[in-house]
Image (cartoon, grey):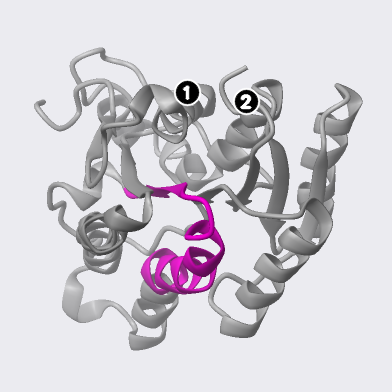
Amino acid sequence: MKLSGRVSIITGGGGGIGRATALKFSEEGASVVVADMDEPSGEETVRLIREKKGRALYVRTNVRNSESIQELVHKTVEHFGNLDILVNNAGIGQSEVKSVDLEETEWDDVLDTNLKSIFLSMKYSVPELMKKGGVIVNVSSLLGLKGRKYVSAYNAAKGGVVLLTQNAALEYGKDRIRVNAVAPGVIDTNIIEGWKKDERKWSVISKSNALRRIGNPDEVASAILFLASDEASFITGATLPVDGGGLIY
C-alpha cells in the first residue's frame, strides 16, 4: 500500500474532494484525521473509513483560527503518535460580482478560508513534519492559474496558494518536506451547485475543457494520493492541474 503506516491530516475532509481523499488515503494504509467544521459530515467520513477497518479520527476545526489549527495538530500527534502528510483542502467559493462590488467582509472570508488557512496549517504542522520528513499537498484551483471575471477574491486566494506552495517547497526541502499543489477545474462538489441551477451557464461551464465534461472528487483525490506518495519522491514546488484540460481550453 502506498501510504502504509503514515499519519495524515485532511482539512475539509467532511465531503467532496476532502472525503474522497480521506477514503483513498485509508485504502492505501494511512491513518486519517478528518478536520472539518461540519461535525455530522466529518463524523460520516470517519464512519466510512472505520467501516472498512481503517483508522480515522474526526477533529472539529476552524481552519481560519490559529488556536483551532494548533489543537488539530496536537490531537493528531496525541492520538496517532506523529504526522506525515498534510492535505490543505478546506475552501469556499464567492459571490460572482465585479471586484469593486464585492463586500470587504466577503473578501476577508474568502482569503482567510482559502489562503490564510493554508499558512496556519503549514505553520503548525511543519515542526512535526520536520521530525522525520513529510509531505504537504495544497488544493489550489484552475482559477489559481488563470483569471476569470467576477471572482476576484477566489482568484487572488487560489493564486496565492500556488506561490505559497513554491515558497514552502524552497524553504523546507532541506528538511525532507515536499510541498506540492493540485489545481482542480470544475469538479462535482457542493461548491458548483449554484452553477448547476443556471441552465444556460451550466451548459457552457460543464463542457469548458478539452474532455468536455466535469470531473469527480475521486479523480482529484487520485492526484493528491500520487503527490503524497513515494511515487512523487522527486517532485516538489509543483502545481498539478486536474482540470480535464481546462487550463489550455
Q: Earlier in the sequence, mark 2 or mark 1?
A: 2
Which numbered marker is on residue 155? Answer: none
Residue 121 colored magenta?
A: yes
Decide if residue 148 is on the left or right side of residue 1.
Answer: left
* Element type where label 1 sits in the image: helix
What distance separates the C-alpha of mark 2 from that of mark 1?
Answer: 8 Å
**Residue at x 49%, y 47% (from the top left corner):** 191
Q: Amino acid at mark 2?
A: Lys
Where residue 153 appears, as percent x and y from the top left, is 28, 69
Of the 4 image quadrants, the one containing the N terminus is top right
Q: Looking at the image, which residue sits at the far top?
A: 211
Q: Quadrant of residue 26?
A: top right
Decide if residue 177 is on the left or right side of residue 22.
Answer: left
As drawn, 71 above or below 36: below
Q: What span is colored magenta in the figure?
A: 113-140
Where residue 37 appears, as percent x and y from the top left, is 70, 64
Which numbered marker is on residue 222? Answer: 1
Circle 1 packing at 10 Å, graded few (<14), some (14-19), many (20+), is: some
As drawn, 68 above or below 17: below
**Residue at x 50%, y 29% (from the top left corner):** 221
Q: Amino acid at mark 1?
A: Ser
Where residue 138 appears, as percent x and y from the top left, is 39, 50
Which numbered marker is on residue 24? Answer: 2
As drawn, 225 above or below 109: above
